[in-house]
Amino acid sequence: MISIDNMITLEPNQERIKQRREDVMRTALRARKFSEEELTREISNFIRFALSLKKIEIEWTHKED
């Protein structure tokens, strides 16, 4: 079970957004060289990961000060 406190902010972190864009571009460039077997394996791993998220229960906690 994952517990999340009131420490969440809705303000975007511009540095993190920039880093994530770079990560996505590197991954996309790497994936262009994949064989059909490698693409199938990557897709399968992603589907397994997405299905595993249904098993995670998130508990939202609110602390009253």
Image (cartoon, rainbow, N blue to C red):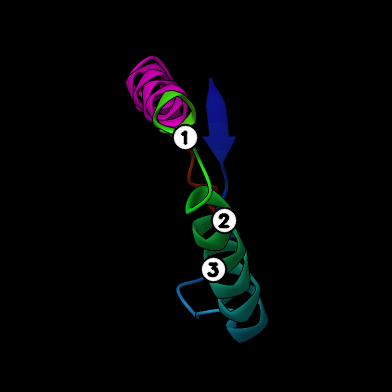
- Is 51 contained in the magenta span? yes
Residue at x 48% of width, y 46% of height: 62
Residue position marked by numbered label 2 in the rendering: 27
Residue at x 56% of width, y 33% of height: 3
- Find numbered disc 1 in the image and state the secondary structure of the residue it sits on: loop
Q: Amino acid at mark 3?
A: Met
Front one among 33 and 24: 33
Looking at the image, is mark 1 or mark 2 nearer the viewer? Answer: 1
The residue range painted magenta reads 40-58
Magenta-highlighted stretch: main secondary structure?
helix
Q: Amino acid at mark 1?
A: Ser
Q: Tag on residue 25?
A: 3
Query: What whole-number distance in Å separates the C-alpha atoms at marks 1 and 2?
Result: 15 Å
Tell me if label 2 and label 3 are in contact, CB under 8 Å: yes
Q: Position of residue 48 (x, y in %)?
A: 40, 18
Q: Position of residue 8 (x, y in %)?
A: 54, 61
Q: Residues within 10 Å of mark 2 (few under 14, many from 20)?
A: few
Q: Position of residue 50 (x, y in %)?
A: 36, 28
Query: What whole-number distance in Å separates the C-alpha atoms at marks 2 and 3?
Result: 5 Å
Above or below 44: residue 5: below
Q: Position of residue 56 (x, y in %)?
A: 43, 20
Residue position marked by numbered label 1 in the rendering: 35
Tell me if label 1 and label 2 are in contact, CB under 8 Å: no
Q: Amino acid at mark 2?
A: Thr
